[in-house]
């Protein structure tokens, strides 16, 4: 190899070494001078720990499911006659009792357990059992404490299945949404656990980062369908109509409540008179209407009775029990776009819906004054006439229609909806349309 070539090779090698040393030096300088920039960190949004109404239907059902599970295990069956059971049955009952103890113990909050000295053997002595009860949830509030941990405060009533007596409860759930687990903090310990509970303010509470699973403190997180939700609203109101008249009355829409009943006493009388219908009422059809500030569920039972729920929050609603006492927006729109003959038909439908509800006062108030004075000077006389001449559950068919000046006259045929073989009764409905959706009417008395 010539001397010249050797020099060239050495120069190239030297350049390579210098370049490598330069790269290493630059890397070290950058590393020493590197300053941490918060912009490179993924910043999680700050969690608002305020205690607020549950806005998620699915979250509501998480709390509902957990509460029902806890109180189901806490309930006792008072129907067992221990004086007549044999040894095998006694052994089975003992096994069931041990499962019950384990379940309740597994669902209770650890700090509550420690503060009360509870273990699996004495849990039924430390935690009071309840009679077998229906669970009626009134309100659920939630506070998200971190990414996975939630606190639910649940207010409701336990309705004794035997005596129908009501007992209010206020229970706290601590829920781990990641592990799908929960713990229960009983009512008597909530004030010790938390200094204050103020709706709309931050809930201050120290929680573990997670809740371990056991056989009893788990739940499934599911997307709740419209049908499931509407059936639950319907059945909740049904239970109130049977067992909790005051709650049912409170749920009534304000304007409707005042026009239809006026006082709680009149509503209570109505509810008691309709207890048979309440027991058998079953959701048969529903329609959903969404408006700016509320969602409306129009429900019909198997007897075509209406229950109109106006919902402003999860399980937060008012209810209307007919379509004639106050005009719904969709009725007013339909009415305004109808011919006079069609308006008369809509009003006749209102009249017979009221009669089938036993709301004779509504019809009496619609009678022409002169007709009223000549035939039914008192409301009692009109009530007696309707009871003697029509059916409790009327179905109608329309016959001939004619007008005479500003009067609209319809012939209608009336049958007993509960008896296909009933006698058909005919009436001539004479109606005058008034301003808006109002009207006055008369009919042939004979």
Image: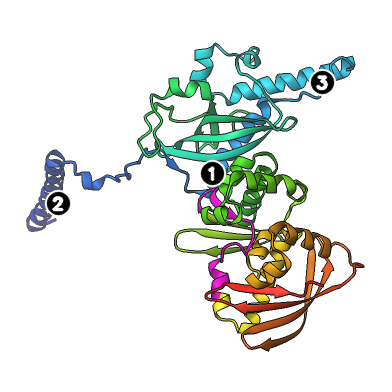
Identified at 70% across, 64% down, the residue is: 353
For label 1, the SS is helix
Q: Position of residue 73 (x, y in %)?
A: 67, 27
| Disc 1: which residue | 60
Nearest the camera: 196 or 374?
A: 374
In front: label 2 or label 1: 1
The numbered dot on residue 92 is 3
277 up-or-down from 180: above or below: below
Asked where in the image residue 195 lies, by quadrant, the reply is top left
Residue 219 appears in view: no
Whole-angstrom CA distance, mark 3 to mark 1, is 36 Å
For label 3, the SS is helix
For label 2, the SS is helix
Q: Which residues are magenta?
A: 312-333
330 up-or-down from 147: above or below: below
392 up-or-down from 205: above or below: below
Nearest the camera: 174 or 148?
A: 174
Farthest-out residue, right: 421
Asked if residue 153 lies in the magenta stretch, the reply is no
User: Crowding at label 3, few (<14), some or many (≥20) Cα neighbours within 10 Å?
Assistant: few
Identified at 9% across, 53% down, the residue is: 11
| Disc 2: which residue | 16
Q: Position of residue 130 (x, y in %)?
A: 66, 24
């Amino acid at each position: 190899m010539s001397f010249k070539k050797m020099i060239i090779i050495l120069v190239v090698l030297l350049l390579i070494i210098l370049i490598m040393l330069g790269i290493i030096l630059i890397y070290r300088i950058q590393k020493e001078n590197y300053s941490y920039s918060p912009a490179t960190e993924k910043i999680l949004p700050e969690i608002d720990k305020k205690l607020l109404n549950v806005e998620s239907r699915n979250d509501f059902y998480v709390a509902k499911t957990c509460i029902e599970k806890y109180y189901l295990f806490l309930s006792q069956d008072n129907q067992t006659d221990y004086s007549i059971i044999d040894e095998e049955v006694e052994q089975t009952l003992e096994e069931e009792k041990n499962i019950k103890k384990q379940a309740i113990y597994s669902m209770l909050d650890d700090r509550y357990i420690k503060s009360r000295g509870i273990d699996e053997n004495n849990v039924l002595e430390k935690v009071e059992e309840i009679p077998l009860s229906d669970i009626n949830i009134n309100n659920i509030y939630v506070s998200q404490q971190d990414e996975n941990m939630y606190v639910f405060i649940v207010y409701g009533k336990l309705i004794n299945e035997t005596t129908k007596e009501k007992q209010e409860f206020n229970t706290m759930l601590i829920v781990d949404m990641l592990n799908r687990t929960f713990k229960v903090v009983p009512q008597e310990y909530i004030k010790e656990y938390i200094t204050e509970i103020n709706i709309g303010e931050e809930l201050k509470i120290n929680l573990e980062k997670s809740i371990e699973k056991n056989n009893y403190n788990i739940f499934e997180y599911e997307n709740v369908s419209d049908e499931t939700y509407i059936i639950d609203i319907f059945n909740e109101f049904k239970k109130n109509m049977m067992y909790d008249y005051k709650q049912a009355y409170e749920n009534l829409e304000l304007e409707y409540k005042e026009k239809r009943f006026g006082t709680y006493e009149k509503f209570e009388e109505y509810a008691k008179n309709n207890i048979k219908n309440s027991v058998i009422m079953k959701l048969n059809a529903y329609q959903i209407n969404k408006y700016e500030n509320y969602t409306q569920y129009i429900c019909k039972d198997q007897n075509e009775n209406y229950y109109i729920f106006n919902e402003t929050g999860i399980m937060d609603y008012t209810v209307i029990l007919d379509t004639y006492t106050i005009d719904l927006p969709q009725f007013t729109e339909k009415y305004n776009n109808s011919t006079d003959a069609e308006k008369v038909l809509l009003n006749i439908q209102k009249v017979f819906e009221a009669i089938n509800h036993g709301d004779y006062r509504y019809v009496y108030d619609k009678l022409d004054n002169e007709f009223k004075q000549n035939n039914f000077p008192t409301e009692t006389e009109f009530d007696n006439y309707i009871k003697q001449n029509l059916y409790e559950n009327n179905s109608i068919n329309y016959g001939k229609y004619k007008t005479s000046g500003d009067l609209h006259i319809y012939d209608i045929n009336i049958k007993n909806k509960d008896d296909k073989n009933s006698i058909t009764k005919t009436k001539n409905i004479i109606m005058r349309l008034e301003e808006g959706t109002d009207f006055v009417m008369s009919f042939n008395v004979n």
